[in-house]
Image (cartoon, helix red, strand yellow):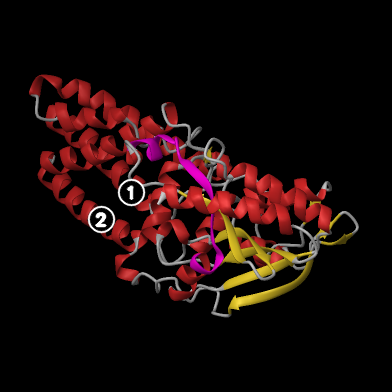
């Protein structure tokens, strides 16, 4: 496939150098969300239509699952994507077959601007240039082509207001936009809210909102390039509903919020029983704190090793860290009882402080975190209370 894309790019470059004049039309295409989690904000590309020669798509969102250590490098933040040129009909057919809305905006460019843009795009897809370090919110399949258009025009692009600005009563943030487009995928958003810290919670500029292609699509028709309209006309290539390809809502009883509150109820029942009989259910604490410790190890990796955007600082770290393994290991050792008691007392105070300070912290938490923190507080309290009572 890489060799075929390279051959196509060479042929396309030669053709466009000859025809990048008045008989060439350039479109900025936006594809609305799909069903897979990496498709939930949509996708963007630049389409070049040469009269009598066909349509070509410049795509900045290609990645290779088969590359060495792909999963590890992706988690670490070394997300290398490629810019490629593809046959336009082949590119569009994939999205149309999956029922995704596709809108193409014809760019209002003169012949010189078209040539500059096409020359720049052809340079970007050269084998030695096509790989770039993808950043989910700062440098992605929407921001790259938008920046290329702006560079070709030689003037700044002023985008129209985004839908999120009109619909939200709160400041628009990266996390807020993600939650909107991930609303039918609450476990995915739960994972994002765990992994990403306060760096995605600041108020965005209009240009930063354009990281989401579905938002950008509504911002382009009335955008300005200098003192003239950026878009000559907009065409719905596939006039489907914006969320036609997205999976339906997750049943309420399978959402993180319900599952976590159910776990809270179980923990409360067990804690009341433990206090009444003055005996800690060690297997439960070992399993619960072990799970918290494993999550803390993941956050440690993301905060101190990963180069992903906004994994640090993460204000969940006082709650989820490797120290949570202390009860898991030492609760079984009688001589370590004092050590576990010191940990649980410290943990109880830290969790109370975190709950009190959370409204003032620059990070938005997932609603499902509350019952989990409450459950941990109960288990720390029950250990302290039972240990003191049995020592009396």
Q: Position of residue 122 (x, y in %)?
A: 63, 47
The answer to whether 385 appears left or right of 21 in the picture is left
The reply to whether the C-beta atoms of the residues labelled 1 and 2 are less than 8 Å apart is yes
Give the residue at mark 2. 263
Q: Nearer the viewer, residue 153 or 332?
A: 153
Query: What crowding class fits label 1: few (fewer than 14 Cα within 10 Å), some (14-19), or many (20 or more)?
Result: some
**Disc with the residue nearer the chain's start (1 vs 2):** 2
Q: Residue at x 48, y 69 (%)?
A: 95
Q: Position of residue 211 (x, y in %)?
A: 61, 52
Q: Label 1's element?
A: helix
Q: Label 2's element?
A: helix
Give the residue at mark 1. 372
The answer to whether 34 appears left or right of 120 in the picture is left
Q: Nearer the viewer, residue 298 or 65?
A: 65
Q: Which residues lie in the magenta part?
A: 72-90
Q: Can you say whether 345 is above or below 222 in the image?
A: above
Residue 37 makes an appearance in the image = yes
The answer to whether 283 appears left or right of 199 in the picture is left
Q: Can you say whether 17 is above or below 330 in the image?
A: below
Residue 333's tag is none
Q: Can you say whether 216 is above or below 132 in the image?
A: below
The image quarter in which residue 274 lies:
top left
């Amino acid at each position: 496939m890489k060799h075929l894309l390279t051959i196509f790019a060479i042929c396309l470059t030669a053709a466009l150098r000859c025809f990048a004049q008045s008989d060439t039309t350039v479109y900025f295409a936006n594809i609305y969300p799909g069903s897979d989690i990496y498709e939930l904000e949509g996708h963007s590309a630049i389409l070049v239509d040469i009269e009598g020669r066909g349509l070509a798509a410049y795509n900045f969102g290609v990645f290779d699952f088969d590359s060495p250590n792909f999963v590890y490098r992706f988690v670490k933040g070394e997300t290398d994507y490629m810019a490629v040129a593809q046959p336009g009909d082949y590119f569009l057919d994939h999205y149309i077959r999956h029922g995704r809305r596709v809108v193409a905006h014809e760019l209002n460019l003169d012949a010189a601007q078209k040539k500059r843009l096409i020359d720049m795009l052809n340079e970007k897809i050269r084998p030695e240039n096509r790989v770039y370090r993808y950043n989910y919110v700062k440098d992605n399949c929407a921001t790259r082509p938008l920046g290329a258009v702006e560079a070709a025009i030689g003037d700044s692009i002023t985008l129209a207001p985004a839908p999120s600005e009109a619909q939200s009563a709160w400041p628009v943030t990266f996390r807020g936009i993600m939650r909107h487009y991930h609303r039918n995928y609450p476990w995915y958003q739960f994972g994002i809210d765990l992994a990403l810290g306060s760096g995605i919670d600041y108020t965005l500029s209009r240009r930063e909102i354009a990281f989401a292609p579905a938002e950008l699509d509504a911002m382009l028709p009335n955008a300005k390039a200098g003192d003239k309209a950026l878009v000559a006309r907009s065409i719905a290539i596939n006039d489907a509903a914006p969320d036609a390809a997205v999976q339906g809502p997750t049943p309420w009883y399978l959402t993180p919020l319900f599952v976590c509150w159910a776990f809270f109820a179980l923990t409360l029942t067990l804690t009341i029983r433990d206090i009444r009989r003055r005996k800690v259910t060690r297997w439960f604490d070992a399993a619960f704190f072990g799970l918290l410790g494993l999550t803390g190890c993941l956050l440690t990796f993301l905060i101190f090793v990963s180069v992903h955007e906004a994994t640090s600082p993460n204000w969940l770290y006082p709650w989820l860290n490797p120290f949570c393994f202390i009860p898991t290991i030492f609760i079984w050792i009688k001589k370590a009882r004092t050590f576990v008691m010191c940990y649980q007392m410290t943990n109880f105070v830290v969790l109370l402080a975190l709950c009190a300070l959370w409204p003032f912290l620059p990070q938005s938490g997932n609603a499902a975190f509350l019952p989990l923190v409450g459950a941990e507080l109960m288990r720390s309290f029950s250990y302290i209370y039972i240990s003191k009572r049995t020592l009396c």
